[in-house]
Amino acid sequence: MLKNLIINRKLLKQLDFGMIIIILAIGLFGVMNIYSCTYKKYGMYYLEHQLMWIILGLIVMYVIISIDYSLFGSYSKIIYGIGILSLVYIDVFGKISGGARSWVGIGSTGIQPSEFMKIAAIIMVAKMISDFEGKINEPKNLIKLIGVVLIPMILIVIQPDMGMTMVFFFIFLGVFYAAGLDNKIIIGGFLAVLILVLILWKSGLFQVYQMKRIFAFLNPDQYELTYAYQATQSQIGIGSGGILGKGFLKGTYASSFIPEISTDYIYAVVGEEWGLLGGLGLIFFYGLLIFKMIIIGKGSKDILGQVLVSGMVATFLFLILENIGMAIGIMPVTGITLPLMSYGGSSILSSFISLGIVLNVGMRRKKINF
C-alpha cells in the first residue's frame, strides 16, 4: 500500500513546484494574520490549529498527487454517492451554526461536508463530460449533468446554506461554460435561477437573517448597526490601514469590532495591518495561482483533466471574488471563507485537495516512459 504512494522521479519532475511555493506562501500568510487577530484573546490556539490543518492538508495533497487522476474518474460515482449521503446525514443530524444545519461535530471540532461535496460533484461532472466526449449541448447529456448538480444543491438549500448554494451555482456555471455550453442555454439558466430564487424567497426557505443580509447589502446605511455591521466594520478596518498598513500585530480595529474575523473577514486584517499594498499583493499571488491552474488545465492530455481543473479554477475564482468583495462592501455577506487564508479545517482541507487534483493533472499531462 505504501509503495503505491511513492511518486516516480520522472513523474515528480513534472510537478509544478512554483505553484506549491505560492500555495504555502498564501497559507502561511494566512496563519500570520489569523494569529494577529486572535492572540490577545486566545494565545497560540488558533495559530497551532491552523498550522495543524495546513500540515494535514499537505499530507492529503501528497496522497492525491500520488494517485493517477483517472482513478478519481473511475470511482466518481462512489465519491459522489458518499458526498450525497453525508449531506443527507447533515440535513437530519447536523449541527446548527450560523443559522444553517451544515456541520457535523467530531470531538471538539466540526466538519462541513458541503466543502467536500463541491469536489465530489466536480469529479462526477468531469467524468460524465469525458464520457460524453465533450458533447455537453446534447439535451440528454445536459439534463443528466444538471441533475447531478441539482441534487446536492437541493440538499444544501434544505440546511439552509444559501452561500454554499450560490458557490455551487457559479462553480458549475464556470465548468459548463469552459466545457462549451451554448450561451443561449447559459442565459436561459440564469433566468431559471432568478425565477427559482423568487419562488424560494416567497416559500419561507430563506431565513429572516438571510433576507436582511440582501437588504443590508442594497442599503448598508440603514443596517450599519445590525445586518451590515460586519461589512461596515470591515471597510473601516481596511480603510484605517491606508497604503502601507499599521504593521504586523499592530492592528486593533478589525480584531476588536468584527465577529468571525479569523474566518469570514480575514481580508480585513490584511487590509488593516498590511495596507493597500498588502491587500493587492495577496490578490496578485491569488492571480498567479489561478493563472498556473489555467495553464495546467489547457495543457491537460484529456477532457477529464481539463474539466477537473476548470472546476477547481471556478471554485477558487468565485470564493476569492466573493470573500474579498464581501470584505470591501461590493458583494453581499454570505459567510464564505477565503481559500488558504481563512481559519478552519474544512476550508483548508478542501483547498489542498482541490489544488492536489490540479497538480495531479499537471504532472500527468505528458506520457512518461518508465
Image (spheres, rainbow, N blue to C red):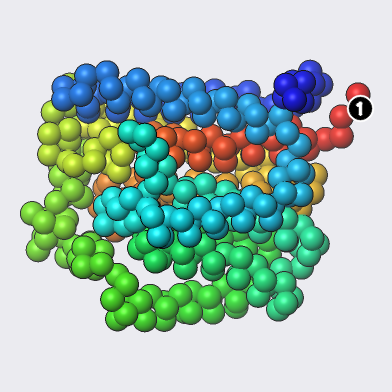
Q: How many marks?
A: 1
Looking at the image, can residue 243 be seen?
no
As shown in the figure, which amino acid type bears the numbered disc 1?
Asn
Q: Give coordinates of residue 87: x percent, y percent.
A: 48, 56
Q: Which residue occupies 17% across, 65% down?
A: 219
Q: Give coordinates of residue 314: x percent, y percent.
A: 54, 52
Q: Residues within 10 Å of mark 1 (few under 14, many from 20)?
A: few
Considering depth in this image, is 191 or 9 the residue closer to the camera? 9
| Residue 166 location, quadrant | bottom left
Q: Give coordinates of residue 95: x percent, y percent.
A: 33, 50
Q: Which residue occupies 40% across, 38% down?
A: 106
| Residue 49 location, quadrant | top left
Q: On the rendered structure, is 213 left or right of 69?
A: left
| Residue 200 location, quadrant | bottom left
Q: Which residue occupies 53% across, 34% down?
A: 352
Considering depth in this image, is 270 or 264 the residue closer to the camera? 264
Q: Give coordinates of residue 67: x percent, y percent.
A: 73, 34
Residue on which disc 1 sits: 369
Looking at the image, can residue 143 be seen?
yes
Q: Compared with residue 191, is residue 150 higher up or lower down, i.e. above or below?
A: above
Q: Compared with residue 322, is residue 135 higher up or lower down, i.e. above or below?
A: below
The secondary element bearing badge 1 is classed as loop
Q: Which residue occupies 28% across, 76% down?
A: 204
Which image quadrant: the C terminus? top right
Q: On the rendered structure, is 311 left or right of 140?
A: left
